[in-house]
Amino acid sequence: MNSLGELERSVMDLLWAGGESLSAYDLQAKLAAPEGLGRELAATTILTVLSRLENKNFVVRERDSRPHRYRAAARREAHMADLMHEVLGGANDRAAVLERFVGQVSNEEAETLRRILAGR
């Protein structure tokens, strides 16, 4: 599973939140905003990050327009589920990891898990 660096995560957060495809310039402006990173980044930096994310299969480049637009390849929830599976896959004792995880969830989250498991 590919992990995300800080800037990659910031870009993905914007793509996941918006649900729309964005150009590197759109992302540059959003990252510069106070609610983004709050700092100016060069367009080439954003393009490099997008290229890396594309290589990691996190984003899809839409080539039918100029400048190219990028969108998340999958929803945030799919990425988070993949991370959870990666952690479980690396555990020697999966049951112990699951037990520890379930022991730390709220009552509401536990009820959600019960409902999901009952639907299987």
Image: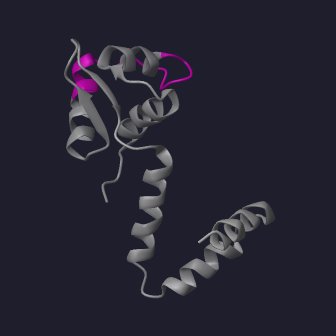
Of all residues, the one furthest to the right in this rendering is 107
Residue 50 in picture, x, y percent from top left? 26, 32
Establish if 17 lies above or below 91.
Answer: above
Q: Is residue 117 magenta?
A: no
Residue located 41% across and 36% down the image: 12
Establish if 113 lies above or below 37.
Answer: below
Q: Is residue 70 left or right of residue 88?
A: left
User: Is the magenta region chiefly helix, strand or loop?
Assistant: loop
Region in magenta: 33-47
Residue located 70% across and 76% down the image: 103
Q: Is residue 9 left or right of residue 65?
A: right
Q: Is residue 44 left or right of residue 109?
A: left
Q: Is residue 40 left or right of residue 35?
A: left
Residue 75: quarter of image: top left
Residue located 23% across and 25% down the image: 47
Residue 70 in picture, x, y percent from top left? 31, 27
Residue 40: quarter of image: top left
Residue 9: quarter of image: top left
Q: Nearer the viewer, residue 62 or 80?
A: 62
Residue 18 in picture, x, y percent from top left? 50, 26
Residue 69 in picture, x, y percent from top left? 29, 21
Quadrant containing the N terminus is: bottom left
Q: Nearer the viewer, residue 52 or 21?
A: 21
Establish if 20 lies above or below 82.
Answer: above
